[in-house]
Amino acid sequence: MNHVTDVFQPLQAADPPVVGGYRLAARLGAGGMGRVYLSHTPGGRPVAIKVVRPELADDPDFRRRFGREISAAQRVRGAYTAELIEADADGAPPWLATLYVPGPSLAEAVARRGPLAVPALLWLMAGMAEALQAIHAEGIVHRDLKPSNVLLAADGPRVIDFGIAVAADATSYTATGHTLGTPAYMAPEQASGGEVTAATDVFALAQTAAFAALGRPLYGDGQGVYVLYRIVHSEPDLSLLPEPLRPLFARCLAADPAERATAAEVLEWCRQRLGADADGGGAPAVWREISGPEVVVPAPVPEPTPVQPQPLIGYRRPPAGEVQRTPAERKVRRRRTLLTTAVGVAGGALLVSALAWVVMDVKGRVEHRNTAGSSASATGPAAPSPASTRGSSSDPSAPSNSADSAASGAGAGRAGASSSSSASPRNPRPEPYPLVMLQTKNSVNLKNPDAKVKGRTGDIRFGCRSAGCELESDTSVFVQLYGKPGGTLDECRTLLRHGKSHRLPLAGAANGSEICIKDASGDIALFVIATKSTAMPDIGFLLGDLTIWRGAA
């Protein structure tokens, strides 16, 4: 088994080459907040770059929280934590860089080598306790201590990932009934939405150590809601744990936070049991056995070679060793150059002629429209031609598509014939509906989007399941547009002609994404997402601009 291949995965086509000035060298993994990459500082020191996933980056509330969390994490310094070097909460996307720890996570080590022996467990708990001391000393609660957030370096564990840690004195920003963290490693007060304190992290420390001792979570596996119920309403079975460590686990897993041991007490308890090894350097041998062979970190990615500027016309310095051409060969090259120049001149002349014809044609159309306008003003006011807007009806400068312009032009040409004119079925006039909101508690019908439909009785609905958020309908069809923004009726009509899906997952959609919709009556709509908020499904929503063409199918 190639351990380097297991740790470092090659970059994919969708991965950015550079984030915040850091050139990415490999993939390290992914978590709930985003993907993690390997990079290097200018001096060559390896760092881990965590890039926030788009669904969270699109949430303004998350960006504000992320900014606060960065400020908190930058204050933490400790021998058993991974230092935060740099971050940008306002980046596109947001990211942070921490020192890279060359070693597997506790979860990976246990999966590969099985449960840890008692001496290793003592070193593990002592290292985690010292890391929590450094974190808590800055008034911070980690909130998500678990096996995947503990890395096993050659000289001891490192507690990482302050992605959802918040300052201990900050007000809670979670939605009602929504908790942050991983269910199998939560404390009872965190699982029930109570106050989260440093004691909450001590409970998670004990659960993480229990996983290392058993090879599985102490409160069992299964759906998160059932695990949380067991944590809140049942006592842990300490008989499964190594007998010498049961007194410490009993204190750390007390249901009442006030009765739990502190991080300092955990550290002191472990040091007493380790005895002379605690000061004699016994840990490295333990960690070498657990973490496996040393990880060889890939070299930094070199800067791309800059493109050399071309020499000035008329000046050429032949490279050394160049084969000199004969006079006959030079004559042939001159003929080719002359022929190329002649073709370019002829093409330029044709382009100028074409532009002249376009200018004359536009001038003629303007004169014709002015003449038509004068005739219309003599007989009565002309009916205004509605402009098609892309995104918002309040933006008079927004461009309309060609079909809409043709419909408007036809209406203006008939000024005086009637007070209003109807667009052709092929080119119906657009109906703009700006700032349409879809939530889990409402729905929309294309027939009348202004009529707010409470509940999920409308045709177009927004919802979030365990697999993610999506648009759904009983009769309407959805197709997402990709490529450059500015979708048109003709594009939607073409894509919807073969569309059959009544569900559209929103994992790949972001602010600015465009979605074509066709209902059972043949109306076609284009929905442009202005704000997508799905990080907290219970209060998630879509806000966007809707344009409808009646009977356009």
Image: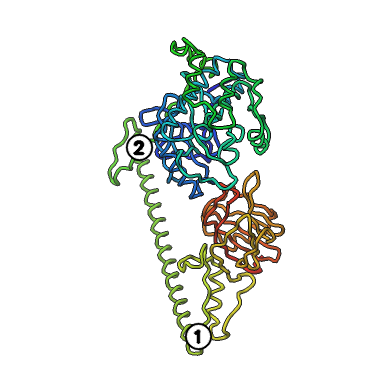
- Hey, what amino acid is under mark 1? Pro
Location of the N terminus (image quadrant): top right
The residue identified by callout 2 is 325
Location of the C terminus (image quadrant): bottom right
Dot 1 or dot 2, earlier in sequence:
2
Q: Is residue 213 left or right of residue 367?
A: right
Q: Is residue 357 placed above or below 175 in the rendered structure?
A: below
- Element at label 1: loop
Residue 36 seen in render: no
Query: Is 388 in front, or is 290?
Result: 290
| Image mark for residue 381 | 1
At x 60% / y 38%, what residue is drawn? 191
At x 27% / y 43%, what residue is drawn? 315
Q: Can you give x and y, in whole percent of width and height, for residue 16 in the image?
A: 48, 40
Q: Can you give x and y, in whole percent of width and height, for residue 98 in the image?
A: 43, 32
Q: Is residue 98 left or right of residue 28?
A: left
For the view shown, which residue lies furthest in the bottom direction?
379
Q: Is residue 186 left or right of residue 23?
A: right
Query: Is 182 in front, or is 205?
Result: 205
**Crowd rating for badge 1 (residues with CA inside 10 Å; few <14, some 14–19, many 20+):** few
